[in-house]
Image (spheres, helix red, strand yellow):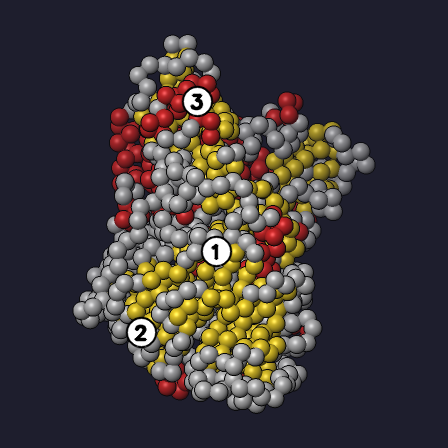
Amino acid sequence: MRHGAFAPGPPPVHPAPHDERSARQRPGRHPHGSDAGVRWGGPVRRTSALRMLAAGVVATATGAALMAAPAWADDTDTARPAGPAGVAPAMTRGLDKAPRQGTPAEAARAHLKAHQDTYKVPVSDLRTVRTTKDGKQSSVRFQQKHEGVPVFGAEYAVQTQAADGGQRITSATGTLYTDLTVSTTAEVSEATARQRMFSLDRQLSRVRGAKTESHGLTVLPDAHGGRLTWHFTVTGGQDDGSPVRQEVFVDARVGGIALSYNNIDAADAAPARGTGVRVDGTEAPLDINKEADGSYTLVDSTRDMYPSTGGQIRTYDAQRKQYTLVAGGPVTDDIPLATSGSTRFDGANTTSGAVDAHLNAVKVYEYYKERIGRDGVDGKGGTITSVVNVAANGGDYANAFWDGSKMVYGHMDGVPLSVGLDVVGHEMTHGVTEHSAGLVYLNQSGALNEAISDYFGNAMETADKGVAMSDPASGLIGEYLCNGTKPLEDCALRDLNDGRDAQKDYQPIPLDIDNGGVHYNSTIVGGALWDMRKNLDPGLADRIVYRSAQNYLTPLSGFTDMRNAVTLAARSLNASEHDLAVIADAFDAHGIEQGWEHKGGTHDGTTIGANVLPAYEVYSGVDEQAAQINGDVYAISHGDAVAWDQGGAAFGITVGRFGKKPRHELAEKDAYLLDPSLDDDRIVFTRITADGVGVYRTGAKGQGAIKKLVDRPDADETEPVTDDGALAYISTTADGEQDVMLQTPDGRTRNLTPEAGTRAARLAMKNGHVAWAGGDGDTLYLYDAATGTTQNLRIPGWLFNYVSDIQFTSDRVFWRETGGFLIPSTTFRSAPLDDLSAAVKPAYPQSTAMAQFSVNDDYFAYSTYDLWGALGSWTGPGKVYVSTMADLLAGSDSFRRVSCSSGAQLAPSLGTGQRVAWLDTSAAATDVVTRGSFAGTCD
């Protein structure tokens, strides 16, 4: 930037937006702000919904096309961080030599107390959650607390067998944390934490119909004694059509977000008999109720649970009600039961999916009752509820999900998703799992959650339709959703017979895409379970899988834990040695063995940050770049909010120089430091403490004391950008105003958006120009300090498009537009600095769904994604492609690969020339990797 480019000039001039679409297409305002989730930006700002898992992830196949690492002698890979948090053994067997007296719960507690040298957790910290019985075996489940506060995911299950008038302890499984020392006195109030949750994560502001539930304090374990947090659940829906059940944990000492993930697992009447017409045209008998007014409803009061608990099977018709108004909590009074004037249910009751949902819910109930011995979803004979015929903004909602209390079904291509027994069984099994293992819905535990649902859904459907386990189609999931319009294999969502291997095929998918691969990776462990069922008595296999989830798995269990659980459950059911060998072979065939997570591939660059959690995965306003780069200096904004047991700092900034050592860590015990921006004189960043959120600085290489630049008590200052002594940032006040503030090198501060109601985001600055997204996120603003004028451009597209990233070269501005419905899409555009109306869309050859990008004067780089969801697809790990700027603007296809690593490549960051950094998952973790030159071709 030219010195003096930010000298005081004429006051800002804001012309009317240049509109490239009709006003009727503009999104409506959201209660939390008119930008409704517009994300933050910076000088080379990264902003989207992607949140990638940091540790415990595994690379894909090692591959043979890897190139040698760059040859500069002073660059060497950094060491891995220190070990994880202290934990008790994940599984024990044979510690007790004789039975213990008392009830299963008393015996289990006595066992834990007697072997405290093994478990290293005081028995007084373990609360008995429940005891489940299965024949002579019982499983006693304990939840760990620290000074009375629950510990996230920390549960232990002790398995007992009745023997000699007492209980023999056969095994114990789960996760307990042994080194918790954190104070349980909150320094940040619950009200402040709730407010910070929305101000620091703009993505939550995009949740439509948002409702917030508070769960009080929770301890997140880590390698430093734990972290005290406030736990909230935000429910509603996203613009793209997906439901939200976001679990958010706000640090109760600092006030920053520590962890955030989406937890969507996608008067009596007289009984009567009726007939239902299914979507495929076949008829089936229905158990229904006759109401006082003479009408009939899809309420079944004939099942075994009704006499003892009053439990029913009830099916409601949302009548195209917005799915976000249905998700979460009990069915509201304005959603009626599916009703008919006679005992025949056809017409709208057929096309809505109500008949199929009701019939299939009965089949699922009976399957669990007769084959497993479980009484309903909750195991206590509780009512089973289904809601069909939900819509998404007036159109079909192409998904189905368990929302924590009920099944919710939409339509796909006009076909209700309730037609598939495997789909209905899948969703109801999510409820069963929630009431047993409670598997956390992300990464391996989430994929295991999906695998168990797939297994039981398919087991029910193969039995119902008489499909042999040896039939290649037996493993197809959702194959009947096309209602005969496609071959079964083309219609199916997934296939348990796909033969995938954990060591070759596990994909460390970003957390905001499929919650870290819960669907995509599920067929790895689901395939092992299905192979087991093929070669065992199916009834025995079903009991083994059910008992594994009921008695052995705990919330943070992964694939190896499932292998252990299945083996222990099989032994408890007196499986033969042959059966145990079949189980071992099934898991071996899918690469699930002890230590499989550490058998990933290799990358072809130099690691400058190992096992990191990029801060943007938790804070939607932080740069979506692997690092910020200025010359030979880099700064990595990272945290430890998901992989809290890997030993990283809460949120800090790693500063280093390419080819030099040592690195420097910017971190404070009582603060979160994130979102750095660099120039030749300083590094600026956001600092979050219990007292406030402001912008602070250190020296250009991270040296020197941390000093305040701006931290007002009546506002939060975020998204700092520094360039040649000038500072720009977003100032957010309590009323939701989000203004762009510019502090010139001489110390004077100007509000570039003085008009009321401003909701600015995605801030970028370079060479005397400041850019941001405003309006509903659909307008790009560009301020010129030399003239004091502001251009703006309404982005093209339809209802849900918004500006999601802005970056500069010396003479152009680039931005990313994100939009679409159900399946997000991404578009890149560019314009000269003096004329936004001359915007062009560069050509690029690969998919850009959910893509990230970076620019310098010579090159344009971007990463590729394809969406994976319950009804989506994933074509493979994302890669980073690069083109010369000249070829890009000329429309020539000269893209080549930045790296040939075997894993996913995300969040590129360009420095000078071909210097590039990116996030790489090849080496069984998320690393920040760099090269001094591009790989080129990878053939």
**Mark sitting on residue 20:** none
Q: Quick one: 575 or 708, which is closer to the camera?
A: 708
SS at badge 2: loop
Q: How far apart are marks 2 and 1 (CA)?
A: 27 Å
Please name the residue that numbered disc 2 is placed on.
632
Does the residue at mark 2 contact the one at mark 1 (Cβ under 8 Å)?
no
N-terminal label among 2 and 1: 2
Query: Which residue reaches farthest top?
Result: 165
Viewport quadrant of the N terminus? bottom left
Q: Distance between the residues labelled 3 and 2?
A: 58 Å
SS at badge 1: loop
Within 10 Å of disc 3 (Cα), the crowding (few <14, some 14-19, many 20+) is some
Residue 844 visible to an observer of this rendering: no
N-terminal label among 3 and 2: 3
| Residue 771 rendering spot, x and y as whole percentages | 53, 78
Please name the residue that numbered disc 3 is placed on.
109
Please name the residue that numbered disc 1 is placed on.
671
- Residue depth check, mark 3 versus mark 2: number of the one nearer the observer: 2
N-terminal label among 3 and 1: 3
| Three-letter code, disc 1 | Ala
Quarter occupied by residue 866? bottom left
SS at badge 3: helix
Q: Quick one: 495 or 96, which is closer to the camera?
A: 96
